[in-house]
Image: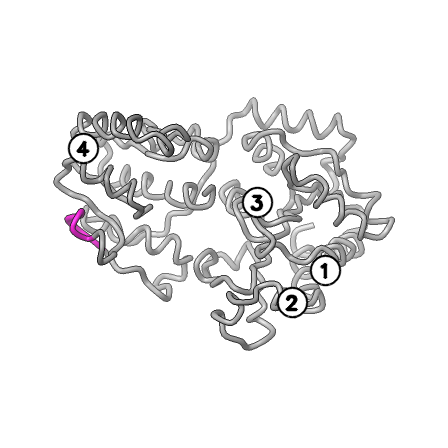
Amino acid sequence: MIGDVLTTSILFEALRSKYPNAKLHYLLNTHTFPVVDNNPFIDDFLFVTPEMETNKITFFTFLQSIRKENYDAVVDVYGKISSVLISLFSKSKIKSAYFKKHTSFAYTHTVTRLKAPQHEASLAIENRMRLLECLDINFKLYEPKIHMKPLELDNAKLYLEQSHIDLKKPLFMIGVLGSSQIKTYPPAFMAKLLDEIVVTAPDSQLLFNYIPKQKQEAKSIFDLCNKQTQAQIYFNVFGKSLREFMAITYHCAALIGNEGGANNMAKALNIPTFTIFSPYLNKQNWFGAQESKKHTAVHLLDALNYAIEDAKKEPLLYYSKFKPEFIIPKLKTFITSIK
């Protein structure tokens, strides 16, 4: 997933700092490449293609190519059967991964995931850094970074200006939809939050982050907003690719919306974020205390006491309890601090 690939990229900055002359390769799925394209800490990319995932012969050929690379170390963040096989075929002297009983035999070093942060970072960052301990790298806070090209940013700025957006006024990217229904704040509730943004920042301009197949879902949220809010939503202005989305987000004052890859990308662009977590997720996994200086994250547990396990069984029921009234005070404070 986008967030996983982007967060894992911090390992390359840590490795480059410790081993400046090392050759560092990143193996990832093809569709996630845009978030790490142009990263100066990575020397080369290897791709797992859709064909490899469905064709055993193609995957075996790929495994043989891995063996020829003669890697000194392999760090497996994924921990699935395919990555276990890749690690084994690498024949590297050092193989690091998270501990799992059924796969630990494949690695020379395994670490147990932390259940609570030790350094006020997200668990996603802290646990990944633990994978480098066998390479004599101790924890240091590295944050994911997206490296845009000047031309990409210039093209995005021109596109926004041609779309009649005034970059002198607050421009907010809205993550109106999550990756699934159980990670999407209820549409009627989201519409109320968007109305509140316009009340708090009357000159604000809103962009919706969605892909073409989600257009109708995004439109349903648009339709639930009041007329004034609708007038300030530029519904048809959006990036046609991940790189275009990131370039547009770079010019925004903040990203506001459901937790997911878009929020991680905004953070990596150094854009303030306001994140709404699904009630069944552990906020500590993707939000660290140190981030609160620039970013805000809200969770139903901030307002109500309940067991995460119960929310996992009935996520939509618990979303219905996550009323806009719980979120609006923090949202107003966030907007006022950056507009």
Q: Give the range drawn in magenta.
A: 104-110
Residue at horizontal 67%, vertical 61%? Answer: 333
Say which residue label 3 marks: 271
- Image marks 1 and 2: residues in contact by CB distance under 8 Å: yes
**Around disc 1, counting alpha carbons within 10 Å, would you say few (fewer than 14), some (14 to 19), or many (20 or more)?**
some
- The extreme bottom residue here reads 305
Give the CA distance from mark 2 to mark 4. Answer: 49 Å
Going from N to C along the chain, the mark reached first, 1 or 4, is 4
Q: What is the C-alpha distance between the residues marked 3 and 4?
A: 36 Å
Give the residue number, with chain letter if any, for mark 2.
Answer: 322
Residue 193 shown in magenta: no
Callout 2 crowding tier (Cα within 10 Å): few <14, some 14–19, many ≥20:
many
Q: Is residue 105 magenta?
A: yes
Instruction: Identify the residue under disc 4.
Output: 71
Q: Position of residue 13 (x, y in %)?
A: 33, 40
Q: How far apart are marks 1 and 3 (CA)?
A: 24 Å
311, above or below 8, in the image: below
Say what secondary structure mark 2 lies in.
Answer: loop
* Mark 3 residue type: Ile
- Does 142 sit left or right of 327 as displayed? left
Label 2 with label 4: CB-CB less than 8 Å: no
